[in-house]
Amino acid sequence: MSSTERNIQAVKLPMDWAPDSWRSRTALQLPTYPDAAELEGVLDELRALPPLVTSWEILALKQQLAEAQEGKRFLLQGGDCAETFDACSSDVISNRLKVLLQMSLVLVHGMRKPVVRVGRFAGQYAKPRSADTETVDGVSLPSYRGDMVNAPAFTEAARRPDPRRMIKGHARSAMTMNFVRALIDGGFADLHHPEYWNLSWVGHSPLADEYRRMVNAIGDAVRFMETLSGSEVHNLNRVDFYTSHEALLLPYEESMTRQVPRHWGWFNLSTHFPWVGMRTAAVDGAHAEYFRGIRNPIALKVGPSVTADQLLRTIDLLNPEDEPGRLTFIHRMGATGIAEKLPPLLDAARRDGRRVLWVCDPMHGNTESTTNGYKTRRFRNIRSELEQAFELHAAAGTRLGGVHLELTGEDVTECLGGARELTESDLERAYKSTVDPRLNYEQALEVAMLIVRKQAQLGAPTSA
Ligand code: PEP
Ligand code: CO
């Protein structure tokens, strides 16, 4: 045995895994590309393009997630349901960053612990769909699967899966990353200047006073510390921001899976923190096979049909070494299902002493259609699922370590309710999502405030 082989065995790299070993499994939710040779050509092109993130960043995030598992940090993960190529613009990117920064400020202030900030962006371009085809007036075409796959217009040309869209998606992701990195490095996230994060269209928000009071209190604390130390507190000038997306389109993910000179194993270098969606999370499926072999921290959506046994088998497969920071479960049960569905999963994981980070997605189990034909979510259901999640974790002796949200910094009316009490007739004013309804700025800020209140009410749990 060569010394390289010995090293690899010592760190338990799965020997029967390769970036393309998922191809021997059943892969759900993938498009059927009409031209296999064209697809392979595109994948070769992608393999030669530079990565979007580095292994150093990925391992730093894994460490932060390990700390979140211990209750020392809280994860805030949020962004669009799906990014679109058209919305890769300065305003959309910076407004989304502003909302996430404001939310994290509320969370840090209220929870007194650092927040891990992860965007659903710079690669969130592929979507699972409930049906492979869509039929309108007797015409059936492939479903729209996100801008990385095809286009939303209901024409044959638009709906044809086009592999070249992966190259464009890679480029758009790189532009988004580049702009976010430049903003952060340039001081956009500086706690000395929270006014940078104000959104011009907000006007007088019912939540503005509470938020302003927090900003002022933090400003006072910063000035007090600086007066005491006699110098500016520099580590408040920048924050870490990580990216995530649903790693659905496995050919793309495979092409971005690389080895690097200074770390062992394989990394998905298209994002820091990929997740598996609910529809593709089967333990014997292609997506689980792909995720088994990468060294990134990974997350899985957990829906109401998952059993305790399936959950434990998933942990065995994806984190056999019980590595800290490796595995996150994002539960999305719905406000009416969570009290019944979540506790058996929490009990099973706790009884077996499994190390996971539990995160609540209060969005995807609460989607409904209005009488006027909009896909929406009611703020009160989102709130209810989130509050129940905190209570159920406290009762089970586990810890809710984060939240996963669909939100935007744009002035949209897609979810009902919230501080401004949006009604069904408001949806017509600014419904922009091509897929799921997102929280707007005010509703997102309100979620951050209610998390803080709920946590304070329950007190910090004593065990993981
Ligand atoms: C999503 O996060 O946009 C999504 C499709 O979620 P889920 O897999 O939980 O349905
Ligand atoms: Co969604």
Image: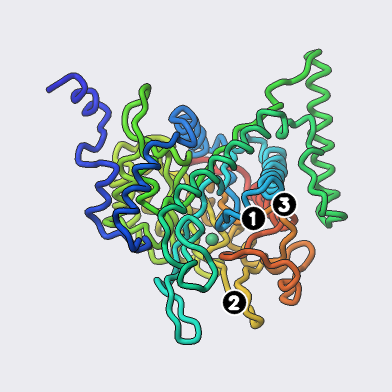
Element at label 3:
helix
Viewer-nearest of discs 2 and 3? 2
Image spot of residue 100 (x, y percent): 67, 45
Front one among 264 and 449: 264
Amino acid at circle 3: Leu
Relative placement, left or right, of 458 versus 56 is right
Q: Which residue is mark 2?
A: 369
Nearer-N-terminus badge (2/1) = 2
Residue 20, placed above or below residue 392: above
In the image, is residue 372 above or below residue 358?
A: below
Quadrant position of the N terminus in the picture: top left
Q: Element under label 2?
A: strand
Q: Where is residue 448 shown, x and y percent of the image?
A: 68, 50
Q: Earlier in the sequence, mark 3 or mark 1?
A: 1
Check the image and name the residue furthest to the left.
1
Q: Which residue is mark 1?
A: 407
Q: Position of residue 255 (x, y in %)?
A: 36, 43
Left or right of 400, for residue 132: left
* Quarter residue 424 falls in: bottom right
Closer to the camera, 85 or 104? 85
Given the image, on which type of amino acid does mark 2 rest? Ser
Find residue 445 and name its label: 3
Kind of residue at badge 1: Leu
In percent of the image, x 26 and y 52: which residue is there?
23
Please report whichever mark, 2 or 3, sits nearer to the chain's N-terminal start.
2
Q: Label 2 crowding class (10 Å Cα cut-off): few <14, some 14-19, many 20+?
A: few
Assess whether mark 1 and mark 3 are in contact (beta carbons under 8 angstroms). no
| Disc ID at residue 108 | none
**Residue at x-position 82% and y-position 38%:** 195
